[in-house]
Image (cartoon, rainbow, N blue to C red):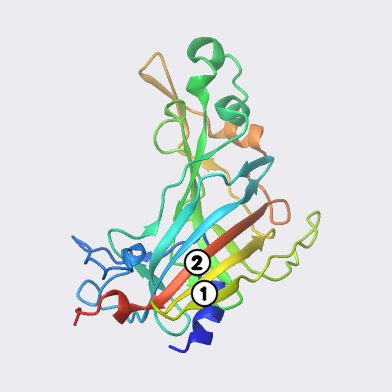
């Protein structure tokens, strides 16, 4: 792959929240060559029959993810690592790759999410800290100027049970992430991302991209599912309705927004796995 093509391709391929890949797991990932250990999530040829030519690792370093009336800042880096073909298409990863489960603290905690203020009297505010974790909900389609990512958001706190999500495999949150300017429905207004700047390391032949920003404010967000409050330790009660009411969900297209500031690295797979045949 030409070096210019590397930089152009990755500007569309490294969406975080973010940013995700289609899984092609192996029991044990092959070890990359020295100097390329950050690409351990990229499947070696012996691990996957997928047409992979390039390995990459991207990091969403900051930004935000707003659904309904909840705006969650991205403060914990979200790492995406895997591999792809030379042309546009599906992303693949092994047992060490994919999307990291980075916890983002949700302002207002469980009380802000549900409106159940009395929970503080029984559990205390510290026990009601809430985290949001973005997970895969389908196969991403990666492009140079646009990356389509189906995701779901896991709302993590024991009070909500183990399966409280916004979005699902059958009804994902579909992000159309771009570095250009959006054209959202009202009431949202256009916002603009930023293409990353690229440098080439002649010693390792790794392309480094920095200062990029993906945006989307046209996606819709479904209602919550699987949120359960267990009273007295054994009486489960669905609180999906409470979560939706307090959080403004479902939220139509034109009322949500994400910005994901990222950096990335990309390199040809034979350099990562020189002995793999």
User: In the rendered view of the protein, which quadrant contains the C terminus?
Assistant: bottom left
Distance from Cα at disc 2 to Cα at disc 1? 8 Å
- For the residue pair 17 and 90, the one nearer the viewer reads as 17
Residue at 54% from the left image edge and 18% from the top image edge: 125
Asked whether the residues under the numbered discs 2 and 1 touch, taking CB atoms below 8 Å apart as contact, a structural biologist would say yes
Compare marks 2 and 1 and give the one earlier in the sequence.
1
> What kind of element bears circle 2?
strand
Q: Position of residue 216 (x, y in %)?
A: 66, 61
Residue at 27% from the left image edge and 68% from the top image edge: 34
On residue 10, the disc is: 1
On residue 264, the disc is: 2
Considering every residue shown, the one lying at the far bottom of the view is: 2
Q: Is residue 37 left or right of residue 180?
A: left
> What kind of element bears circle 1?
helix
Q: Position of residue 174 (x, y in %)?
A: 56, 60
Q: Position of residue 250 (x, y in %)?
A: 63, 45
On residue 20, the disc is: none
Specify few, some or many for label 2: CA neighbours under 10 Å numbering under 14, 14-19, or 20 or more: many
Considering every residue shown, the one lying at the far top of the view is: 121
Which quadrant of the figure has residue 85? bottom left
Number of the front mark, 2 or 1 = 2
Residue at 48% from the left image edge and 21% from the top image edge: 127
Q: Position of residue 161 (x, y in %)?
A: 41, 31
Whether residue 13 appears in this view of the structure is: yes
């Amino acid at each position: 792959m030409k070096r210019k093509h590397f930089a152009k391709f990755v500007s569309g391929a490294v969406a975080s929240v973010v940013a995700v890949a289609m899984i092609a797991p192996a029991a044990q990932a092959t070890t990359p060559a020295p100097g390329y250990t950050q690409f351990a999530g990229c499947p070696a040829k012996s691990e996957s029959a997928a047409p992979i030519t390039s390995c990459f690792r991207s990091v969403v370093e900051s930004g935000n993810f707003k659904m309904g009336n909840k705006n969650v800042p991205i403060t914990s880096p979200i790492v995406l690592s895997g591999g792809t073909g030379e042309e546009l298409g599906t992303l693949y990863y092994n047992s060490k790759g994919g999307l990291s489960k980075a916890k983002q603290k949700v302002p207002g905690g469980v009380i802000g999410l549900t409106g159940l203020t009395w929970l503080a009297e029984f559990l205390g505010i510290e026990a009601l800290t809430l985290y949001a974790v973005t997970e895969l909900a389908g196969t991403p389609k990666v492009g140079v100027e646009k990356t389509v990512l189906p995701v779901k958001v896991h709302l993590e706190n024991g009070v909500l049970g183990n399966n409280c999500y916004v979005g699902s495999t059958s009804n994902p949150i579909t992000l159309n992430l771009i570095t250009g300017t959006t054209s959202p429905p009202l009431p949202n207004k256009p916002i603009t991302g930023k293409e990353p700047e690229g440098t080439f390391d002649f010693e390792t032949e790794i392309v480094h991209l920095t200062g990029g920003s993906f945006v989307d404010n046209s996606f819709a967000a479904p209602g919550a599912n699987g949120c359960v409050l267990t009273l007295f330790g054994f009486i489960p009660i669905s609180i999906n309705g409470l979560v939706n009411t307090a959080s403004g969900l479902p939220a139509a297209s034109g009322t949500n927004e994400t910005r994901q500031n990222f950096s990335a690295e990309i390199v040809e797979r034979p350099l990562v796995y020189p002995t793999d045949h």
